Amino acid sequence: MIFRHYDIDNMSAMENRYRTKFINSLSGFKSVNLIGTQGLDGTPNVAIFSSVVHLGASPALVGFIMRPDNGDRHTLENIMKTKNYTINQVSADFYQAAHQTSARYERDANEFDKSGLSAQNIDNFNAPFVKESRLKYSVKLKEIVPITVNDTLFIIGEITRVICDEQAIQPDGFIDIEYLNTVSVSGLDSYHTTESLSRLSYAKPDLPLTILNTNGTIKV
Amino acid sequence: MIFRHYDIDNMSAMENRYRTKFINSLSGFKSVNLIGTQGLDGTPNVAIFSSVVHLGASPALVGFIMRPDNGDRHTLENIMKTKNYTINQVSADFYQAAHQTSARYERDANEFDKSGLSAQNIDNFNAPFVKESRLKYSVKLKEIVPITVNDTLFIIGEITRVICDEQAIQPDGFIDIEYLNTVSVSGLDSYHTTESLSRLSYAKPDLPLTILNTNGTIKV
């Protein structure tokens, strides 16, 4: 195996699109989620994000990174006005439609129609869910943290309602998102399904790990 | 398909460990990375994180979430003292050793020895790499952003050197981390390898997507 080394100068010298693809590959596999919002006039918006990250379970908090200077702008404007949004996991059967939402549509475009996804309104909540998604939740805005070092924003919200295909929910609370065919992304544009290695027991010093089945029982 | 709904009260009523596993499943597939640090006396430390997230390509920035009140404390102390750390992607052949680093070892324990991973020192950089990792990089601390809503920290750094198995680097800059057998995690403890669906072209309004091969060429 031959390792290639790149220092800061090597990275600076990379052609822009090359560097974007290269650096985007470094963090590992990323989550793929559609964020649903609507304007005050009810115009629905949906956009794909690969930066949704778990922040805490109690309260249930989730964050994601936004770049206000590009296509994320409509999503940001809507969230600041309505204070609510939805996050919807993307399954393999609609990953191409999800990717299409990243195109830079005009302000009044309905990305659901453009991409072929279906908006789903539930109990008059003021943000649309993605009907095709098998694991989705509503989120209430809690805080927008400016990341000054590169003018991005870290958007933090509390999960207020979870909607999930009940077949995926395991006895110990774990949700089998592989069963839901949830995809992940590497780099900017490479989509993947998964194959389970195993679950592992809670690690303790000086004790060997136990291999677990998907349902949390010990693998024998 | 039957969907189950959970509101805030349902989530609050969940037993603690059940809720932790449930909420941790919501964000989707997460990256798996080992973060290497050392104390001022040179004691190496390595710990697993599932919250590393891409922040920007130019400058090359990466962030991750820390919980100072639990096992992440040693990593945090070291980063604050030395200002440097390494991030190392985890491959399927050592995911169990990587998971073992999450055990709460004593301050002076060497998690490399405890888990069976190998520390790799390169050019006197003051943080250890993980020898087994096929894609790893050094990071210089730029900013620690407090997330006041749940007392976590968002640690932001600039990528200063990348070391990667050259076989994975594609002609357009994309790194094929599936070829590296990089794993992802869902929930707290479920590890997965991946299977590629496709790469997709940059999305544009009113134009169909093009399916791409891993090397960036058009799939025919």
Image: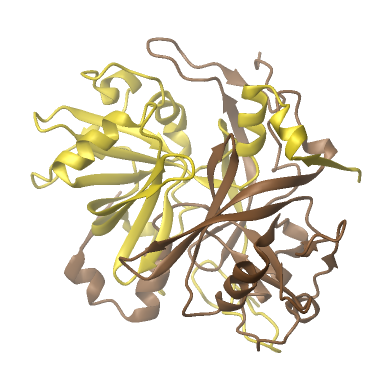
Chain colours: A yellow, B brown
- Please give the count of numbered marks on the rendered protein: 0
Residue for point 42% across, 70% down: B21
Residue A2 vertical placement versus A43 (above, below): below
Work out which residue is located at the far top of the displayed protein and give it.
Answer: B207
Nearer-the-camera pick, B165 or A142: A142
Q: Is residue A173 visible?
A: no
Nearer-the-camera pick, A164 or A203: A203
Residue A128, percent from left and from top: 20, 38
Q: Is residue B45 shown left or right of residue A102?
A: right
Residue for point 62% across, 21% down: B212
Q: Which quadrant of the view contains residue B60?
A: top right
Residue B103 vertical placement versus B11 (above, below): below
Residue for point 41% across, 74% down: A172
Q: Which quadrant of the view contains residue A159?
A: bottom left
Nearer-the-camera pick, B3 or A148: A148
Q: Quadrant of the C terminus of chain A?
A: bottom right
Q: Is residue A39 shown left or right of residue A167?
A: left
Residue B81 vertical placement versus A162 (above, below): below
Residue B73 vertical placement versus A18 (above, below): below
Residue for point 70% across, 64% down: B95
Residue B172, percent from left and from top: 70, 23
Residue A96, percent from left and from top: 46, 27
Q: Is residue A52 visible?
A: yes
Q: Is residue A139 shown left or right of residue A96?
A: left
